Amino acid sequence: MAQYRSSLLLPEDRLLKIRDDFIKEAQAGLRGENSSCLMMASMMDVLPNGEETGDFFAVDIGGTNFRVILVSLSESRGEVARFEMEDFAIPEEYFSCHADRLFDLLADSLVSFAKRHGFSGKKTAPVGFCFSFPVNQTAVDAGTMIKLTKKFDNEGFVGCDPVQMLQQAIQRFKAPFKVVALLNDSVGTLAGACYEDPNAKVGVILGTGTNACYVEQVAKIGTLAKGATSRPRMVVNTEWGNFTAASLPITQADREMDETTPNAGEYHFEKMVSGMYMGEVARRIILQLAEDAQLFGPSVPDELRVPWALSTPALSKIAEDDSWVLSGTAQILADDLHLPASRCTYSACSTVKEVCLMVSRRSAALVAACLAGLLRHIGRDGSHGGMQATTVAVDGGLFEHFDAYRGFLRDYLDLLLTPEVSAMVQLKRIRDASSMGSAYLAAAVTASPE
């Protein structure tokens, strides 16, 4: 266990090195130089401020489901008068059909949803489109699809403009909607916070995957075409999941897991941080302990060798297990890994819990280090004089459902920032962030003069 403690429980000086390496990569990406952080200009140069009014729709797709929402913003600043939302499962055939059919599904669902909720259609309604796939964004309402991800394998997707595709589908239904904003989930999270909190400057996704965006000075975005905007600030999508540096604590378990993934050799940071991978990293460490230290007796249970058998939700329950003699952990090992009760001794369960805690702490520590780097880069860590109140908007199941994780993240931020600065940084959970943020951005874009 000693080797895992030294590689997973990161001291302050190591985290500060990671922070500084992240800043270097981020700044190189902004200049357009070779960098593991793409630092993509989102073209979102206006954010909601709570003064928007009217009815706005949003379509949010990024996985096996999609969502349609209606938001009515009242005359009272920052107040939502009405909120309607429906989730739709994507039928299996739509993951491989032509892209036109998938966009028809989205448009049909939007039109039907609007009718169910009394939308008169007397005037054209603005729509925000959260499209969480790799896109080269060229305008607030335009971009080019770079590649397919997740389980999608649709012809006609790559190279298309998602806004045009959705707008054309809406026109086929002769419906009064106009798609006015294109964004991803991290930008939506930030926008969702900005509507009610003027101190929101950073948006973070901590769920199955991870990403972050923030408000940057346009003059610092070297990749932005001259004259692309007349406004002084724009949201930058860091794509920090791909952050790589020699200072990152990549273990043998990480390397072995990475080799089994479709994007081997990429997204090292995401694979040490996000919910998709944490359980599997822990399983591999537990397996190694079973082989080297006879954690579960003289033989290694076959069930422990099954890849991805330990989920991150199970890891979180083990990490938070306060039951008598860790009976909760023993039950999870029995349910998820099918380990016989006779093998789940208190000693074994105690070691398993420690592994889960260390993997969780490492994730929180790495996020805190990069977040501290982002705050330093934008002058929000007190290093450039007076400190301003700063809100970091966060969405994702890892942050929402894993209580201990939120505590770890706060603790590591407190460690890396001075007490006075840390007290001014708020981590704020934003509910239904990408969907709400999409509608808010549609409102902001509509309200903003060209």
Image (cartoon, rainbow, N blue to C red):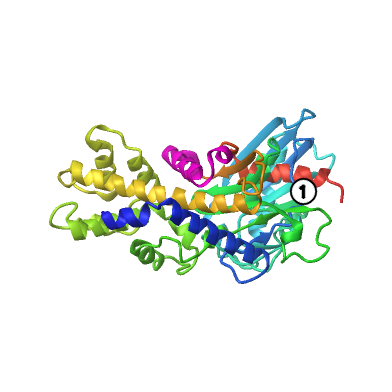
**Between 267 and 132, the one nearer to me in the picture:** 267
Residue for point 46% across, 48% down: 364
Could you tell me residue 273's position as x and y percent?
Answer: 46, 53
**Between 429 and 245, the one nearer to me in the picture:** 245
Residue for point 36% across, 62% down: 251
Residue for point 39% across, 66% down: 260
241 left or right of 110 in image: left
In the rendered image, the vertical position of residue 365 relative to residue 73, given as above or below:
below
**Between 103 and 292, the one nearer to me in the picture:** 292
Residue for point 79% across, 35% down: 53
Could you tell me residue 373's position as x and y percent?
Answer: 57, 53
- Is 411 inside the magenta-drawn segment? yes
Would residue 378 be seen by someone viewing this image from the given angle? yes
Outermost residue, front side: 385
Outermost residue, bottom side: 34
Q: Main secondary structure of the magenta part?
A: helix
304 left or right of 174 in image: left
Could you tell me residue 118's position as x and y percent?
Answer: 74, 33
Write down the residue under mark 1.
46
Near mark 1 (Cα within 10 A), the count class, few <14, some 14-19 or many ≥20, is some
Q: Which residues are magenta?
A: 399-422
- Is 434 inside the magenta-drawn segment? no
Rendering quarter of residue 328? top left
Q: Quadrant of the N terminus?
A: bottom left
Would residue 164 be seen by someone viewing this image from the given angle? no
31 left or right of 13 in image: right
SS at circle 1:
loop
Outermost residue, left side: 298
In the image, what residue type sits under mark 1? Answer: Val
Could you tell me residue 339's position as x and y percent?
Answer: 22, 48
Rendering quarter of residue 102? bottom right
